[in-house]
Image (cartoon, rainbow, N blue to C red):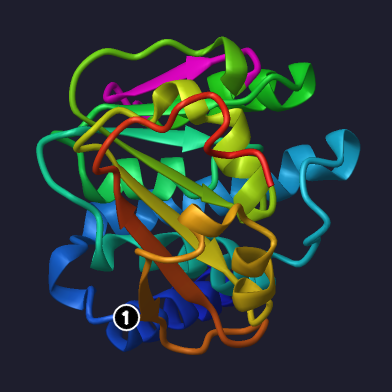
Amino acid sequence: MDSQWESLRTLLDAGLQRLGLAEQVPEATRSNLLLYVEELERWNRTHNLTAVRDRFQMVSRHLLDSLTFVQKLPDEVAILDIGSGAGLPGIPLAMLRPAQTVVLVEPAVKKVAFLRHVLGRLSLTNVQVAPYRVEDLQFDGGAVLISRATAEVADFLQMTQHLLEPGREILLAKGPRWAVELERCPRQWQEGWELVPLPELDGGQRVLLHRRIGQRPDRQALVP
């Protein structure tokens, strides 16, 4: 084990401790989380999967930021990662929740190729890749919709309108402009969100916006 790997492991361990997840993440999972970062950095050199180039920043700004979803993530339902990109937050969450199905919704061809490669590399059997636009996704059964860095809240609601079944939950990771984004939503969707403050990681303060769907909105409900 080289010194850089040890430094990455120290950074990951400290972050898990800060998030209150240290006891939930066994040794094998920690090694796989860092293996994921290693593969992401390697592919990123030629495929431009993420603007974050440094592997240390990938640990804090990608891995740990993704794992903040665990605070509100429901059990025993499928996790639909909308606009998954390079597998964030879906792949790190799948490692922590091996009993739950995770669906990575991502239409970009080069990102889909990476997702399929890294899932095989990590032997993750609870993850599916949906290689098309979310507007074309159909899903029956219990599910929570999650996303980070995909779209503003109003745009996210519009693109997922057909998935907003009663009882389903939405979890969105947002930065300090979350209030501005909510103000841009239709009035009936500006309220009813639970704001979950998150520990500050590299990259500034983050929050989770959480909402359970009470009733399916009609066609006009999400039009400003």
Prevailing secondary structure of the magenta residues: loop
Q: Residue 103, percent across and down?
A: 40, 25
- Whether residue 132 is visible: yes
Specify whether residue 129 is painted magenta. Answer: yes
Viewer-closest of 124 and 131: 131
Q: Is residue 113 above or below residue 101?
A: above
- Whether residue 84 is visible: no
Residue lying at 33% horizontally and 88% vertically, measured from the top left: 18
Q: Residue 136, percent across and down?
A: 57, 10
Q: Is residue 28 left or right of residue 84?
A: left
- Count of residue discs: 1
Viewer-closest of 120 and 2: 120
Q: Residue 154, percent across and down?
A: 64, 49
Residue lying at 19% horizontally and 18% vertically, measured from the top left: 141
Q: Is residue 2 above or below residue 205?
A: above
Q: Which residues make up the magenta segment?
A: 123-133
Q: Is residue 186 left or right of residue 168?
A: right
Per the image, label 1 sits on a secondary structure element best described as loop
Residue lying at 48% horizontally and 76% vertically, measured from the top left: 207
Query: Residue tagged by mark 1?
Result: 19
Residue lying at 47% horizontally and 54% vertically, measured from the top left: 188
Q: Residue 194, percent across and down?
A: 33, 70
Three-letter residue code for mark 1: Leu
Q: Quadrant of residue 183?
A: bottom right
Specify whether residue 11 is painted magenta. Answer: no
